[in-house]
Image (cartoon, grey):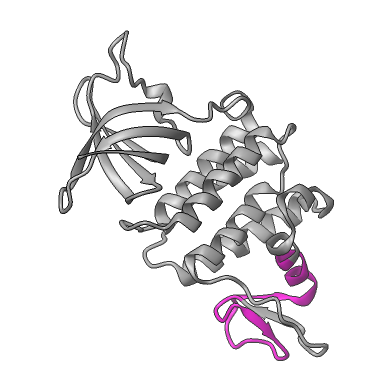
Amino acid sequence: MLHKTRGIILKTTLYSESSVVVQIFTEKFGIQSYMINGVKKPRAKISMNMLQPLHLVDMVAYHKHNTGIQRVSELRPAPVYSTIPYNIVKSTVTQFLNEVLYKSIRQQTTDEHLFDFIFNAMCWFDECGPANVNFHLAFLLKLSRFLGFAPSTITKSDDNYFDLQEGEFKSRTPSHPNFLSKEDALLFISLFTSPFEKIHEIKLDNKTRRFILDKILIFYTLHTASFGDIRSHQVLEEVLS
């Protein structure tokens, strides 16, 4: 049967000279793989430009249960990004977030709340004017709520540490190295709780921003199976420095 659904492009893999297999996080079916033919032809209805990481699309697709690779009938950008493809900071941040998302989400069933969060966050990032250099930090911390390991914001007066393994504040130094001081943890929590419209008010220098990002990636490694290394991490740091 043919189904209309929104989608978020995650990964495109070459299959033949003119065909690709695209993994798309769909609103209706979770993550699905789609064979798309003829994308490199001059007059292709679906071109490679439409299949870039975290591009947002409307699609009409065939869907068969228990089938590894589905097929697409129609696909178009919706909305068309106006800044992300043309801004080096935004495009690098998008590549980085795409790699983290690809390694973090495994939903092959519907998860509309997660879908809406990613979709709306990327729309905001595209429309927000100059690239906000705190966006990727806030995005990943907010994303953790939908992945099931959001940091606790509850703190008592004698709590001086934030335990990344437990995801909560502690009064005593954890017996492992995966923790934050209270000062750093408050930045961590501010990025988690502040709406995107307010994250520019959180003042971080480059050194602190790199430190917080390293801790966020450790947080993901501790709570996401087979997370592994993030290759685009260093490229992102170079662009933002």
Where does the magenta region start and end?
A: 164-189
Please tell me whether residue 125 is drawn above or below residue 144 in the rendered image: above
Q: Does the magenta stretch include residue 173?
A: yes
Does residue 70 appear left or right of residue 183 in this picture? left
Q: Quadrant of residue 120?
A: top right
Q: Which residue is drawn at 55% across and 52% down?
A: 117
Residue at position x 32%, y 9% from top?
43
Question: Looking at the rendering, which quadrant does residue 3 occupy?
Answer: top left
Residue 199 lies, with reference to residue 13, above or below; the image says: below
Horizontal arrangement in the rendering, residue 80 relative to residue 30 (left or right): right
Q: In which quarter of the image is the N terminus?
A: top left
Q: Of all residues shown, which one is farthest toward the top?
A: 42
Q: In this view, does 227 lie to the left or right of 63?
A: right
Quadrant location of residue 128? top right
Quadrant (top left, top right, bottom left, bottom right) of the C terminus: top right
Q: Tell me how many marks there are.
A: 0
Q: Position of residue 166 (x, y in %)?
A: 56, 81
Residue 123, image x, y percentages: 60, 38
- Residue 136 position in % (x across, y down): 63, 49
Front-most of residues 179 and 63: 63
Q: In this view, does 106 lie above or below 149?
A: above
**Residue 65 in magenta?**
no
Q: What residue appears at the point 32 percent right and 58 percent down from the top-left corner?
A: 109
Q: From the viewer's perspective, tell me whether residue 144 is left or right of residue 75.
A: right
Compared with 38, 207 (above or below) is below
Rendered residue at 43%/67% (across/down):
224
